[in-house]
Image (cartoon, rainbow, N blue to C red):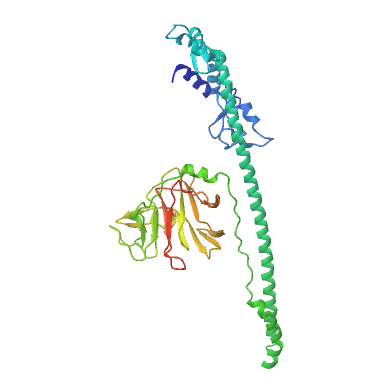
Amino acid sequence: MDVRGLIESLKEDLTCSICLGYFTDPVTVKCGHTFCTQCLLQCRKGGDDTFTCPECRGLINYRNFIPNKSLQNLSITGKMLRPHLLQSMVGLTTCDQHGEQKKLFCEEDQRPLCESCSLAPEHKHHHVLPMDKATEKYKEDANSLKQSVISEYEKIYQFLRKEEKQHLLRLGQEFRNNMAKHKVNKAKLLLEIQKLQRMVLDVEDNLDKAPSEMFRVMKIPFERNEEQLLQEVNVDSSIWSTWPITCLREMLKNYHRDITLDPETANPHLILSEDMKHVKCGSFLQILPDSEEISVDSFIVLGAQTFTSGKHYWEIEWGDNTEWEVGVCKVSAIQNGNLSILLEDICALEGYRCVNDFFFWKLQHGHFVSEPIDKMGILLDYEKGHIAFYNVIEENLIFSSSEMNFQGTLRPYFALSRHNEEGTLASLSICPRSNK
């Protein structure tokens, strides 16, 4: 970097990204960004203590501002020193051809010129400015472009915040609707219980009568209630609606990893493709080199990749499975093809296909129902102890785990059922990045 570049870099480091001027009474916030105190307070809406950082949109509290006295002093010094540094550079830039100082700047050729160069035929119709004016003009252009970028991102933030608010409002309304349905069903069940209790009392009241008389008396109420007793009580098992999240998949693709399957961890019943992207259950026991059968009921294979930090995303596509389990796991040991995986070291989502009408998802703490999906995305955030599962086609969230404390090495985890209800052997594929 040349001297002018170093001067400009220093100015940038001493510039507030809000007012684009040298820092005045700078403060540093929790996320590490620094702004002028008054500039930052202008971003605070109303009397809220908490608002978002103009740089990273992270939450900050104005009570936690940290004054940066050293940066304040450095900004004052830099502001006073910069004109002298730029002035001293004038003598350093001379034209090799004419030996004159380059005091002009050609906008078409984007290079400094001396007076003699500007009169040359090749610059006759070019727009030539004094160097100081050209510097100010490009500074304004850069600041204008920066403000335009900030404005465009703010539009995106506003759109996503509005989408988030609408999503939460719809979810809240659906929750209230489902609770109302459950309340109605509960009332129906209580009514049926009361009817049965009355029938029991009627039977008890007629126990001392002759069998023929008791049968005659009880025949009518039994016939009347028989159809009701045989009818299945309609207990609503609601499927929660989901809504697409704008640009979700494009964001997730930034963390895409090329996942392949590890044949040394594959259950002997499983057959892996040559590219290690596809697995299916074999119709007979597969004998794998240097491996032993783990369990005839454990159709497990792990990804070859290992994770100890960072964000990682991959996509999988179902075959004709009716039951599967996907996620990540911590491998305690792999010796001679034998896996040692503890149940508490598995963080996965278990799914069941129910007559193609819906999917039943089983978690470590509960379950839920969703519409059927064909392709799933999985995002692992190691540092946050977070794993999330997405519907790739509809671009919406299936399930997001609460924060966990990941330790050690994690690997992608896949478990397949033997076959579906029609007897078709189960399979699963890992999608490449370019797969739509």
Above or below, comparing residue 57 to residue 420 in the picture: above
Q: Relative to 197, is 133 above or below?
A: above
Asked whether 99 or 341 is in front, the reply is 99
Image position, residue 113 (x, y; %): 49, 12
Q: Position of residue 79 (x, y in %)?
A: 55, 17
Q: Look at the image and tell me in which quarter the N terminus lies.
A: top left
Q: Residue furthest front?
A: 121
Residue farthest to the left? 290
Q: Position of residue 419 (x, y in %)?
A: 43, 65
- Residue 19, x across and y down, in percent: 61, 25
Residue at 58% of width from left, 18% of height from top?
A: 137
Depth check: give the residue in front, 131 or 21.
131
In terms of image quadrants, where is residue 235?
A: bottom right
Q: Is residue 223 left or right of residue 78?
A: right
- How many numbered marks does the figure carry? 0
The answer to whether residue 414 shows anywhere in this view is: yes
Residue 345 visible to the viewer: no
Residue drawn where x is 55% and y is 51% of the image? 394
Residue at screen point 65% across, 51% down: 170
105 w.r.t. 194: above or below: above
